[in-house]
């Protein structure tokens, strides 16, 4: 025999509603999380493309800088060798 204060039926119904509500809400949340990660993936792809372009530009500029440093270094070595040859020539002629 059930009494008016027996909430078992009410509790079962609420439990079923709460479970359905929770599952639906979790499915909605799962969908939003998936959409958020999809947006993040697209943004990361764009960021990767920008970084690749910057890397190419930086590599090109560094290559030019290294080339310039090699040219300057070779010029300084040639100037030093010419100076040393002049000094040796001066010393030889003075003996």
Image: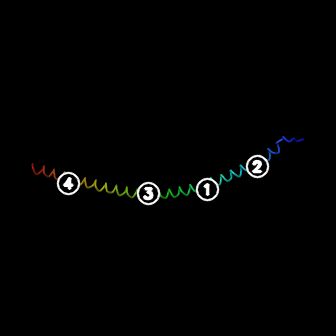
Tag 1 or tag 4, which sits nearer the N-term? 1
Tag 3 or tag 4, which sits nearer the N-term? 3
Q: Work out how far the residue at label 3 is from the one at label 1, CA to CA, in angstroms.
A: 29 Å
The secondary structure type at the circle numbered 4 is: helix
Of the two numbered discs 4 and 1 in the rendering, the one whose residue sits closer to the viewer: 1
Q: Position of residue 78 (x, y in %)?
A: 23, 54
- Residue at 54 percent of width and 56 percent of height: 43
Is the Cβ of the residue at disc 4 closer than 8 Å to that at disc 3? no
Q: Residues within 10 Å of mark 1 (few under 14, many from 20)?
A: few
**Mark 1 lies on residue:** 35
User: Is the image coloured rainbow, by chain, by secondary structure, or in one colour?
Assistant: rainbow
Q: Work out how far the residue at label 4 is from the one at label 3, CA to CA, in angstroms.
A: 42 Å
**Mark 2 lies on residue:** 17
Tag 1 or tag 3, which sits nearer the N-term? 1
The secondary structure type at the circle numbered 3 is: helix
Of the two numbered discs 1 and 2 in the rendering, the one whose residue sits closer to the viewer: 2
| Position of residue 2 in the picture relative to residue 29 (left or right) | right
- Residue at 35 percent of width and 58 percent of height: 64
User: For residue 59, which numbered disc appears in the image?
Assistant: none
**Mark 3 lies on residue:** 54
**Mark 4 lies on residue:** 82
Q: Residues within 10 Å of mark 3 (few under 14, many from 20)?
A: few
């Amino acid at each position: 025999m059930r009494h008016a204060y027996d909430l078992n039926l009410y509790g079962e119904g609420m439990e079923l509603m709460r479970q359905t509500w929770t599952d639906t809400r979790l499915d909605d949340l799962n969908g939003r999380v998936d959409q958020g990660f999809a947006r993040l993936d697209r943004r990361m792809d764009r960021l990767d493309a920008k970084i690749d372009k910057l890397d190419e530009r930086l590599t090109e500029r560094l290559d030019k800088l290294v080339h310039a440093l090699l040219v300057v270094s070779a010029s300084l070595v040639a100037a030093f060798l010419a100076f040393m040859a002049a000094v040796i020539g001066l010393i030889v002629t003075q003996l």
